[in-house]
Image: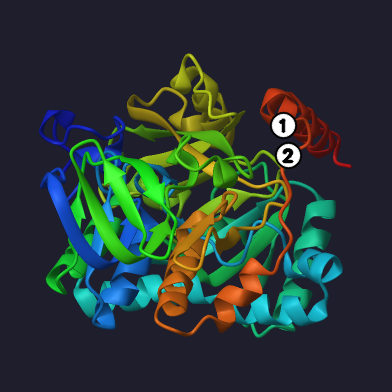
Amino acid sequence: MNAPTSLANNPGHAPSWYAASANDKTIRPTLEGDVEADVCIIGAGFSGISAGLTLAERGYSVIVLEGSRIGFGASGRNGGQIVNGYSRDLKTIASRYGEEKAVKLGAMSLEGGNIIRERVETYGIDCDLRHGGFFAAFTDKQIREMAAHKAHWEKHGHDGLEMVAKADLPGIVKCDLYAGGMVDRYGGHIHPLNLVLGEARALESLGGRIFENSRATGVDTGPSPSVRTAKGSVKAKYVLVCGNAYLGELLPQIGSRMMPVSSQVIVTEPLDEATITNLLPADYCVEDANYVLDYYRRTADNRLLFGGGIGYGGQDPANIVAKIQPHLAKTFPSLAKKKIDFAWSGNFALTFSRIPHMGKLSDTVYFSHGDSGHGVTTTHLLGKILGEAVSGHAERFDVWSSLPNFPFPGGKTFRVPLTALGAWWYGLRDKLGM
């Protein structure tokens, strides 16, 4: 992994540690003129690149249009945690959509992480892959809930979960706040921007073309679809819309079913090896069990990357460090005065159901969005499923697209305050141990 340098030689990204330490800072060309491909993909994040790589491996010609840079959005800004499953557990999915759907989604629930590991191995992607994740519980109630999730998940074949008692916490994380927790041995963490850049290189090695700074300005959803940009167009047999929280107003029929939500990340100065190893001896990524949660992990150059916070509607706080550093200091008092070298914010797409939304705008235009905070793994899975559907194997796509999706109550005007009110209530429950 490259040591972080100035962001000046990697323009167009958020001011993140990821952008500073990216292995590949190549700027791809802007689309100029009219071109053709079998498939045109809007968005060069995990969903779009995963779909494109799936199709290129099957011999399709692929063009990806990115409004900014590869991994500009959540794919290149997230906490870098491989968290299995979905934003709602399989028991909730069964109660909402029926046991048959829960079984089918359960069978896919570990696949996203497996896709990541397979592509890292197949294409030799240098993204600091580490294995293992930990869910930290503050209360006995949260421990009981974790144990129940573990038992239900094991019914769907997940055999990598292990409950951890408070006495055993020092082997995983040195924090006095926690009452226990659960290890997921199929979890892990990565440098997400280097992962998506490596996957993009793999796509290009198979003949795929990626155009940066080429924002889609219009989409023809007819039998011969096309996508327009400011300086050109792509004519294709299929179009895949993978813009997620950064889709903007391009396709309101999709955008109205999701809401951008911001999360913030800070990264400390490099710590000495003994300090970071003492705090996170197992080198697992960690997230806590609160509704508005904190998450953190060790980086390859021995920094602590710590994230949290939430901004419905995608608003960034006035001072990211002031918002997040107190949480870091509470979790690890010994780091309270450490210098913060990087601080950034980024948006993910939230659906009202907190379940990803897949579907079609026509027989030639497919979309996927709304991973609702579990995007690292689900985007890889759903991108692959988009590729399967285009290549004539839509069975798994049909499962996802059959799930009902609803707009947020209150429309664009009131969805933010109503959602924030709900988050306040659940946050209060966490504080009161309810």
Residue 174 placement (x, y as % from top left): 54, 48
Instruction: Report whether 128 appears left or right of 350.
Output: left
Residue 298 placement (x, y as % from top left): 38, 49
**Secondary structure beneath disc 2?**
loop
Q: Please state which of residues 433 and 425 is positioned toward the viewer in this rendering.
A: 425
Question: Residue sitting at 70 percent across and 56 percent down?
Answer: 180
Q: In which quarter of the image is the C terminus?
A: top right
Q: Please state which of residues 278 and 311 is positioned toward the viewer in this rendering.
A: 311
- Quick check: can you spot residue 127? no
- Amino acid type, label 2: Phe
Mark carried by residue 411: 1
Mark carried by residue 231: none
Instruction: Report whether 412 appears left or right of 3.
Output: right
- Amino acid type, label 1: Gly
Q: Please state which of residues 179 and 197 is positioned toward the viewer in this rendering.
A: 197
Q: In the image as oriented, which residue stretches furthest toward the front?
A: 223
Marks 1 and 2, how far apart at CA: 6 Å
Question: Residue sitting at 44 percent across and 56 percent down?
Answer: 221
Question: Residue sitting at 20 percent across and 69 percent down?
Answer: 202
Instruction: Report whether 241 appears left or right of 133.
Output: left
Query: Tags 1 and 2 in contact by the CB under 8 Å rule?
Result: yes
Question: Residue sitting at 21 percent across and 75 percent down?
Answer: 123
Q: Dot 1: few (<14), some (14–19), or many (≥20) neighbours within 10 Å?
A: few
Instruction: Report whether 425 appears left or right of 128.
Output: right
User: As displayed, is residue 280 above or below residue 37?
Assistant: above
- Quick check: can you spot residue 139? yes
Q: How many marks?
A: 2
Residue 102 placement (x, y as % from top left): 74, 76
Q: In the image as oriented, which residue stretches furthest toward the right?
A: 434
User: As displayed, is residue 299 above or below residue 368?
Assistant: above
Q: Please state which of residues 100 and 311 is positioned toward the viewer in this rendering.
A: 100
Residue position marked by numbered label 2 in the rendering:
408
